[in-house]
Image: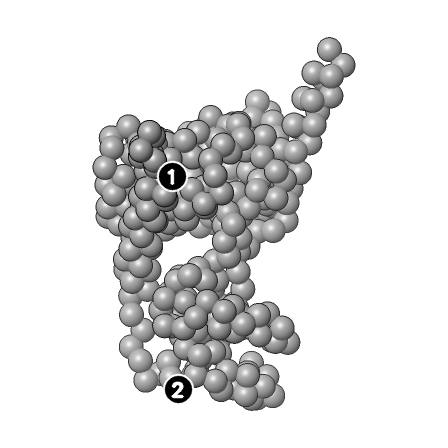
């Protein structure tokens, strides 16, 4: 980073909240906007305005990915480079971000269930008592077996927030925090349904870890596309070798790909894209290709059914 760029960034982050936001992201894996609001002790409107300013700034310091209906924020490489040599960072001992992050995610998961209980009370009446666990169970149907969303917007949004939490704990392999997040559900059958949903993510962890390595990235993308497009296709051994994975793992990947396509096939294109974005952080080309693949197969099946 040259002095000109550093000086421009220094002028941009001179406000207390902008620098505080960057410090939070520097000391964490990633954070949602609601987490930033809580950690900064500021209003949602103020944080939204700050994030918009970062988006307009010519030097990209903060990036985001879509997870369901939410944006999850983190620092760019330039943002990390700047923070590594910033006096405020030097004066602080960087905490163990993984532990801090998992604890914060667990608290968010607990809040989601409390919010769902409040929503259930709102929907209850003298004649009809609505249980929060029933709302969660109904929200899991399309995720487990496919089909359209059937709940009201508020309930679906709360369940989405909870699932984002457990997805992130799964992909980061924070097993202790994940176990606690599942125990919040209380009911064994509901917990098992969510666990089944999370099992879809397990085969992708090695893919996610390898996508950042240039020597593996292309091979991994090809393996993922093959698993989703033609699971019966003959798999070249050299492709697995380049990805440093084995056939047993690829078998799990194919099974998960089939289940995922079943789950998302009836959803809107944007929701499908967001679903894949949860799996493959900052892999827009791969997420777009998978979304187009699922949508094309869906349209192809509709054409066959119409002609019949």
In space, the residues marked 1 and 2 are separated at their CA atoms by: 52 Å
From the viewer's side, name the closer residue of 256 and 242. Answer: 256
Q: Above or below — where is 292 with respect to 42? A: above
Q: Quadrant of residue 231?
A: top right
Q: Residue at x 43, y 73 (%)?
A: 21
> Quick one: which residue is furthest to the right in this view?
307
Colouring rule applied to residues? one colour
Image coordinates of residue 134 in percent, x first then y, are: 34, 32
Is residue 7 visible in the rendered image? The answer is yes
**Could you tell whether 164 is left or right of 263 in the image?**
left
Tell me the element at label 2: helix
Q: Residue at x 36, y 72 (%)?
A: 41
**Could you tell whether 306 is left or right of 84 in the image?**
right
- Counting residues from the start of the chain, the first of labels 1 and 2 encountered is 2
Tell me the element at label 1: helix
Task: Provide the residue designation for mark 2.
Answer: 87
Is residue 226 visible in the rendered image? The answer is no
**Could you tell whether 194 is left or right of 261 in the image?**
left
Q: Above or below — where is 117 with respect to 131? A: below
**Total marks in image:** 2
Task: Provide the residue designation for mark 1.
Answer: 123
Q: Above or below — where is 151 with respect to 71? A: above
Q: Residue at x 24, y 33 (%)?
A: 187
Q: Nearer the viewer, mark 1 or mark 2?
A: 1
From the viewer's side, name the closer residue of 283 and 194. Answer: 194
Please identify the quadrant where the C terminus is shown. Answer: top right
Q: Quadrant of residue 94?
A: bottom left
From the viewer's side, name the closer residue of 63 and 90. Answer: 63
Q: Which mark is residue 299?
A: none
């Amino acid at each position: 980073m040259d002095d000109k760029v550093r000086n421009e960034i220094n002028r941009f982050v001179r406000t207390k909240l902008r620098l505080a936001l960057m410090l939070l992201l520097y000391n964490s894996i990633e954070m949602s906007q609601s987490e930033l609001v809580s950690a900064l002790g500021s209003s949602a409107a103020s944080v939204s305005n700050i994030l918009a300013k970062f988006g307009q700034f010519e030097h990209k310091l903060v990036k985001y990915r879509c997870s369901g209906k939410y944006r999850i924020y983190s620092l760019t490489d330039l943002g990390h480079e700047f923070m590594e040599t910033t006096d405020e960072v030097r004066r602080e001992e960087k905490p163990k971000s993984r532990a801090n992050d998992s604890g914060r995610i667990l608290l968010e998961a607990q809040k989601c269930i409390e919010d769902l209980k409040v929503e259930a009370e709102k929907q209850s009446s003298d004649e009809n008592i609505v249980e929060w666990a029933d709302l969660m169970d109904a929200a899991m149907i399309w995720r487990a077996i496919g089909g359209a969303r059937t709940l009201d917007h508020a309930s679906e949004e709360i369940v989405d927030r909870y699932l984002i939490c457990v997805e992130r704990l799964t992909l980061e392999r924070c097993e202790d925090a994940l176990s606690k997040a599942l125990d919040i559900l209380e009911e064994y059958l509901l917990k098992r349904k969510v666990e089944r949903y999370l099992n879809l993510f397990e085969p992708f962890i090695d893919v996610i870890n390898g996508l950042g390595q240039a020597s593996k990235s292309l091979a991994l993308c090809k393996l993922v596309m093959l698993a989703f497009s033609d699971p019966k296709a003959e798999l070249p051994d050299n492709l697995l070798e380049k990805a440093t994975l084995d056939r047993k793992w690829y078998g799990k990947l194919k099974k998960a790909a089939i289940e995922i396509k079943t789950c998302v096939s009836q959803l809107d294109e944007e929701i499908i894209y967001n679903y894949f974005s949860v799996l493959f952080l900052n892999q827009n080309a791969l997420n777009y290709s998978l979304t187009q693949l699922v949508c094309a197969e869906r349209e192809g099946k509709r054409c066959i059914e119409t002609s019949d």
